[in-house]
Image (spheres, grey):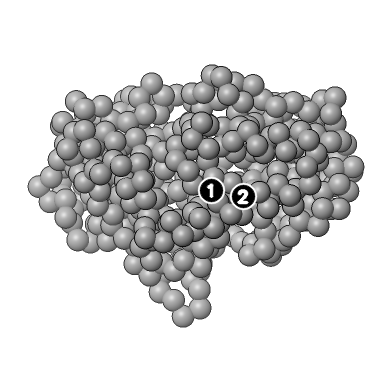
């Protein structure tokens, strides 16, 4: 059955303690002026927010809070500009690092001794928090300011890899370094990889987790799921996201504006019966498809009836999210060539390249779909580079 967000641990294991938990316990920030990158999911195992925890332990040491995509409180939708402001409790200033500024500027960094970074990643290359971290690392290098990354679990486990590597010609804010779609690393581990492979060499300090095991999914950690972005309400969502996010690059609704984003997908022009039949015929592992209808309250086809499908993950161990997403796009295009369209720019600060290409990190996947290449052949095309990445990442793994 699909995973859920209930709090449990794997048999015989202890509950996970995040980097924030250990950072708070050890209080290495005494006497420092801190800049903090966080959002609503930046909480301890017992649901205390990092702003409160750090303030309680060290007084008013937080000088500025930097807001990533969706804002500090997770109240802004995808690609909405985040504005400057002030903590609603008359606390530190809030400065955006999503929009015109993607990293703290040097004046901001000059006011602090350390930048503390605490965001929950999803385990997919598109999710922008990793790239916010990369921008912060670059800025900290210039300012000679240490950056402390508080590590958190990869919700999708730290073993499974899937998808093609990013082609540097398609680098964007949804992918700035050659890693696969599903990378199987924690955000702290990615920090180490990027610091080395991007030749940043900033003063990076990762506060490791305690008791996290690479084969665990988030619902096995003993931690409580707090949605890290408005359309990531459950672990079920995160599990399908690495593939179904591809629909953002098409005129197919990815279910934004519904209660099951990325699990529901469709469009007014889709023949749902034919689509289910086509997808079932592919015998994709670990997943089943059920005919569905929905009316999004915002985003694509707002207020309009969409015919489509809800996907149900039956076996998370065998499920291939990225391959499933490619199969969905290919099937809709083949069934409805007169209506299917690739979305045009702009998308995530890109104004020239097709959104689908910057999501996949290449034009090869789109061209393969346009040539009706079988999906198993598409999948075989990235296996060699995936194994090369598996070998490369070994020296950056912390667990």
Q: Pick the quarter of the image with the N terminus.
A: bottom right
The x and y percentages for residue 315 are 68, 64
Q: Can residue 204 be seen in this view?
A: yes
Q: Identify which residue is drawn at 74% across, 26% down.
A: 341
How far apart are the two marked residues, 2 and 1, measured between alpha carbons? Answer: 9 Å
Give the residue furthest to the left. 31
Q: Identify which residue is drawn at 64% across, 62% down.
A: 316
Whichever of callouts 2 and 1 sits on the residue coming sooner in the sequence is 1
Q: Identify which residue is drawn at 35% across, 41% down.
A: 198
Give the residue furthest to the bottom. 12
Foreground residue among 95 and 167: 167
Is the residue 46 above or below the residue 146 in the image?
below
Q: Identify which residue is drawn at 32% across, 31% down.
A: 103
Foreground residue among 15 and 355: 355
Q: Pick the quarter of the image with the C terminus.
A: bottom left
Determine crowd level at label 1: few under 14, some 14-19, many 20+ residues with C-alpha closer than 10 A: many
Q: In this view, does 124 lie to the left or right of 243?
A: left
Q: Is residue 329 left or right of residue 75?
A: right
The kind of secondary structure element at disc 2 is loop
Q: In this view, does 323 lie to the left or right of 22?
A: right
The x and y percentages for residue 394 are 41, 61
Q: Mark 1 points at which residue?
A: 180
Q: Can residue 45 be seen in this view?
A: no
The numbered disc on residue 382 is: 2
Q: Which label lies toward us, 2 or 1?
A: 2
Determine crowd level at label 2: few under 14, some 14-19, many 20+ residues with C-alpha closer than 10 A: some
The x and y percentages for residue 215 are 51, 68
The kind of secondary structure element at disc 1 is loop
Does the residue at mark 2 contact the one at mark 1 (Cβ under 8 Å)?
yes
């Amino acid at each position: 059955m699909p995973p859920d967000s209930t709090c449990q641990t794997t048999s015989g294991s202890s509950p996970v303690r995040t980097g924030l938990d250990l950072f708070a316990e050890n209080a290495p920030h005494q006497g420092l002026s801190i800049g903090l990158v966080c959002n609503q999911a930046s909480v301890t195992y017992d649901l205390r927010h990092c702003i409160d925890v750090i303030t309680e332990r060290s007084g008013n040491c937080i000088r500025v809070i930097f807001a990533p995509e969706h804002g500090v409180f997770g109240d802004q939708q995808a690609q909405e500009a985040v504005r400057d402001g002030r903590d609603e409790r008359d606390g530190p200033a809030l400065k955006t690092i999503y929009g015109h500024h993607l990293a703290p500027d040097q004046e901001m960094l000059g006011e602090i001794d350390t930048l503390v970074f605490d965001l929950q990643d999803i385990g997919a290359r598109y999710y922008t928090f990793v790239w916010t971290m990369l921008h912060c690392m670059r800025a900290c290098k210039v300012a000679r300011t240490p950056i402390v990354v508080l590590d958190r679990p990869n919700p999708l486990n730290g073993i499974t890899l899937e998808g093609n590597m990013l082609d540097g010609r398609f680098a964007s804010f949804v992918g700035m370094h050659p890693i696969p779609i599903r990378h199987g690393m924690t955000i702290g581990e990615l920090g180490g990889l990027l610091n080395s492979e991007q030749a940043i060499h900033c003063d990076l300090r990762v506060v490791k987790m305690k008791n996290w095991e690479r084969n665990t999914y988030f619902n096995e950690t003993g931690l409580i799921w707090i949605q890290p972005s408005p359309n990531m309400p459950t672990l079920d969502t995160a599990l399908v996201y690495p593939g179904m996010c591809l629909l953002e690059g098409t005129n197919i609704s990815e279910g934004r504006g519904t209660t099951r984003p990325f699990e529901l997908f469709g469009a007014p022009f889709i023949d749902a019966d034919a689509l289910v039949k086509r997808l079932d015929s592919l015998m994709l592992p670990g997943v089943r498809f059920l005919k569905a209808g929905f009316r999004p309250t915002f985003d694509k086809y707002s207020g309009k009836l969409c015919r489509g499908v809800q996907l149900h993950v039956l076996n998370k161990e065998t499920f291939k999210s990225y391959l499933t997403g490619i199969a969905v796009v290919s099937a809709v295009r083949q069934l409805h060539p007169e209506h299917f369209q690739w979305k045009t720019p702009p998308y995530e600060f890109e104004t020239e390249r097709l959104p689908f290409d910057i999501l996949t990190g290449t034009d090869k996947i789109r061209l393969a779909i346009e040539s009706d290449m079988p999906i198993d052949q598409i999948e075989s095309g990235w296996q060699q580079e995936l194994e090369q990445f598996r070998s490369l990442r070994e020296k950056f793994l912390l667990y």
